[in-house]
Image: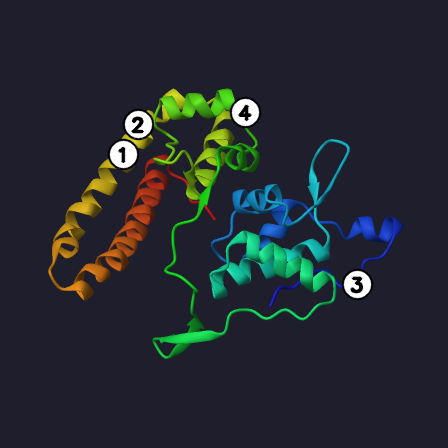
Amino acid sequence: MLQTPSGGAGHGTAATDRLMSIGTVLNVLRDEFPEVTISKIRFLEAEGLIEPQRTPSGYRKFSAHDVERLGHVLRMQRDHYLPLKVIREHLEAMERGEAVQLPALGRQRDGESVAEPPEAPTAARIGRQELLAAAGVGEEELREWESYGLVTPLEDGVYDAEAVTVASLIAELGRFGIEPRHLRVMKAAADREAGLVDQVVAPLKRHRNPQTRAHAETRTKELAGLTVKLHAALVQTALGVRLP
């Protein structure tokens, strides 16, 4: 359960004092959602699911209601596999005081009931304008990143939702003077690591047994997670630092 500052909506100075920065919100949410990122919060804002206040200098300030709403969004994504459009409709109905019924829990997994999606789950996709808004960059920057292969659109011109994280990180590194051309070595290393994982799971993908082929996706995720952790540990060791 999300823990937010006590008190109601309030007015005036007291309400202002309870507003939180995006970093504080991230720490609150991570108690229940360890994988949430600042990029994810910005993306949900760009999608109109939350509307934090802005200071005169442009910094986001979140109320306890914003944090609670974010928790609802993340929970419906995690537990019920709902797309953002449906989540938005649910939230609007809740705010109107209407009864909201989420998808019934169905199939069992490891003895635990989980939501049965109406269709086979598909990877999240976002459009170009959504990506620009979520990452807070312009067309020229995105075209440059694409020219270096750092961000790549899919066949139908949309992007995998993970492109938001990639774009936001590229933008953050740019503030330290690290240009897209400098990141080609990181892209090459990522491609090599992905190739290694694919080489390991390739026999599973080609297996005649459907269950074995299905297991390939789980094995890919496990290996990807281990690869990312090893990469991070090697970078920290090389720099002689320890990240929190």
Label 1 vs label 4: CA separation?
A: 27 Å
**Which callout, 2 or 4, points to the residue nearer the camera?**
4
Q: Nearer the viewer, residue 199 or 208?
A: 208
Q: Disc 3 on helix, strand or loop? A: loop
In the picture, measured across the screen, residue 83 lies left or right of residue 59, that is: left
**Which callout, 1 or 4, points to the residue nearer the camera?**
4
Q: Say what amino acid the circle numbered 2 marks.
A: Val
Q: Say what amino acid the circle numbered 4 marks.
A: Gly
- Name the residue that disc number 3 marks: 7
Label 4 vs label 3: CA separation?
A: 39 Å
- Name the residue that disc number 4 marks: 138
Mark 2: few/some/many CA within 10 Å (<14, 14-19, 20+): few
Q: Residue furthest right?
A: 12
Q: Disc 1 on helix, strand or loop? A: helix
Label 3 vs label 1: CA separation?
A: 49 Å
Whichever of callouts 4 and 3 sits on the residue coming sooner in the sequence is: 3
- Name the residue that disc number 2 marks: 185
Q: Disc 4 on helix, strand or loop? A: loop
Whichever of callouts 3 and 1 sits on the residue coming sooner in the sequence is: 3
Q: Disc 2 on helix, strand or loop? A: helix
Q: Say what amino acid the circle numbered 3 marks.
A: Gly
Quadrant in the picture for the N terminus: bottom right
**Contact, CB < 8 Å: mark 2 with mark 1?**
yes
Label 2 vs label 1: CA separation?
A: 6 Å
**Contact, CB < 8 Å: mark 4 with mark 3?**
no
Residue 164 percent across, percent down from the top left: 47, 39
In the picture, measured across the screen, residue 10 lies left or right of residue 3, that is: right
